[in-house]
Structures are given as C-alpha cells and as structure tokens.
Image: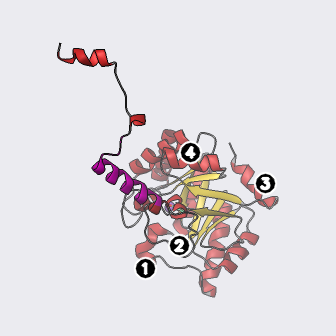
Amino acid sequence: MKQTTDFLKMKKENEKVVMLTAYDYPSAKHAEQAGVDVILVGDSLGMVVLGYDSTIPVTMDDMIHHTKAVRRGAQDTFVVVDMPFMSYHLSVRDTLINGAKLIQETGANAVKVEGADDVIDHIKALTKSGIPVVAHLGLTPQSVGVLGGYKVQGKSASAARKLMEDAKKCEEAGAFLLVLECVPKQLAKEVSNALSIPTIGIGAGVDADGQVLVYHDLLTYGVERVPKFVKQYTNLNIEAEQAIKSYVSEVKKGTFPEDSHSFTMKEEELQGLYG
Ligand code: KIV
Ligand code: NA
C-alpha cells in the first residue's frame, strides 16, 4: 500500500500518478488488479451509480456504505473518499467529526474536499488531526449551482491567477494531492510546476502530474453521454445489452438452460418421487 509521501516521491521522479474512481466491490477489484495508484470513491457515485443528476444529494451514509465495499475489494490500494456536500462547511469541529467517521468506519486512507477560500482552514485542521487531505480545484461539482453549470474554469487571466493562488494555499494547508478538474491545459501545467505536491488532472491536459477518470466513463458503463475530457476505452453498454438480449431470447426459446447448466438425480430415485 502506498503512503502519502510516496506520491511526492513519484512527482520528483516524474512518475505519473494514476487515479480511478470505484464505488463497490467489483469496481475496486478491477482498479486494484489493473494497478491504479489511488482509488477515489468519488461522490460522482450520486450520478453514475445512484442516478441523481448532480453530486448534491449524496450523503455521509452513501459515502460510507460504498467506501466499505471498495475497501473490501481493494485491500492493498490507497483509497481516497470524497467528503460529500456540506459535510466540511459548517464548523471545523463538524468537519473533523465527519472526516474521522469517513476514515474510521471505512478504512479509507484519505479524504477529498472541494474548493479553497473558507475550506482552507478545514484542510489544515483535518491534516493536523492526522487525516490526509486531497484538495480539488477548478470545476468543483458540489458548487455547480453557484458556478452556473459544468464549465471549464480559469480561462481568464484573473481566474487563472485566483486558481494558482488557491492551489498554493491548498498545498500550504497540508493537502498532499490536488485534483484539477476542467482547467485549460496550459494553466494546469503552470500550477503543476509551481507546486511540490502532485496535481491530478481530469480535463486538465497531459502535463498534470497524474490523471483521474470516472470508472463508468472509461468503460462506458451505464453512462450515455460523456464529457469531452473522457476517453472511452471500451463500451460495456453494448456488451451488456447484447448479453442480456441473448439471455432473454434463449429463455423465451427454451434453449437456455442446457444440460451443462442443469443438475440430475438417479432415475430410481425419481421413480420414488410419489412413494
Ligand atoms: O467524484 C468524483 O468522481 C471526482 C473526480 C471526478 C475527481 O471528484
Ligand atoms: Na467528487
């Protein structure tokens, strides 16, 4: 299992950090067996697993339930769990209680929070208390209502300057990784050069220190439309639909199950069925 300090070393040695989301036992097993460096139990589970249209409805209980399953599927991989909407904005005390609960009840290794500004003090407090923190800037989906939609962030000089300042504040506050979502690739490169902690890009170009994708997007599993920054490495929707259609048709025709899927008993035992 990697340690937070291993990620700093990876950056120094120019080794990319590969992060993938997972939400349950099978997806965690896939991620671990494929050799990802970090599993993120993203609150994107609200959309790709639970069918909500944003991450806002996701609760602490949802995150705990899914992260426990992920831990069972990936016992040797570093696991980060998203702190859900409004679980790190009230008092620092509430943040610490929620952060501790997420880590203690699930066995996850770190938490992730979105934004800087008022969140900086919470990153500091979590880190000081012994909970490693991943920061997340750029498009921060829990603020979609305020941002006015899922749009690229940091495109103007002033927005880029603000993002750069926020990134430095996250690092100073103790974050050990920084997710950059939907920012111009040139800005992601500058931010990555300015920080000593690794940046993990999603829609942030190739010069981030690592990349993250959502499991269901990468596999085209359940999702219909994917954002521009996703590469669809396969299409499980097609595989699944074809397989289930074959099942339906074979059951209707009576060609499934075959003898190879069936159990038998001795003929003389069958004779005794009615005494
Ligand atoms: O919830 C999530 O999947 C995320 C990643 C997109 C970084 O926060
Ligand atoms: Na998230």
- The foreground one among 246 and 34 is 246
- At horizontal 45% and vertical 70% (from top left) the residue drawn is 143
From mark 3 to mark 2, how far is it between C-alphas? 27 Å
Numbered disc in front, either 4 or 2: 4
Badge 3 element: helix
- Nearer to the camera, 136 or 174: 136
Q: Looking at the image, tell me whether mark 4 or mark 3 is earlier in sequence order.
A: 3
Single out the mark in the foreground, 4 or 1. 4
Front residue of 239 and 20: 239
Q: Which residue is mark 3?
A: 9
Residue to which mark 2 is pinned:
139
Give the CA distance from mark 2 to mark 1: 11 Å
**x and y, in percent, of residue 107 in the image:** 54, 40
Colour theme: secondary structure
The answer to which quarter of the image holds residue 57 is bottom left
Identified by mark 4, the residue type is Lys
Q: Is residue 239 left or right of residue 182?
A: left
Residue where numbered disc 1 is placed = 148
Disc 2 crowd, CA 10 A, few/some/many (<14, 14-19, 20+):
many
Disc 2 secondary structure class = loop
- Give the mark nearer the N terminus: 2 vs 1: 2
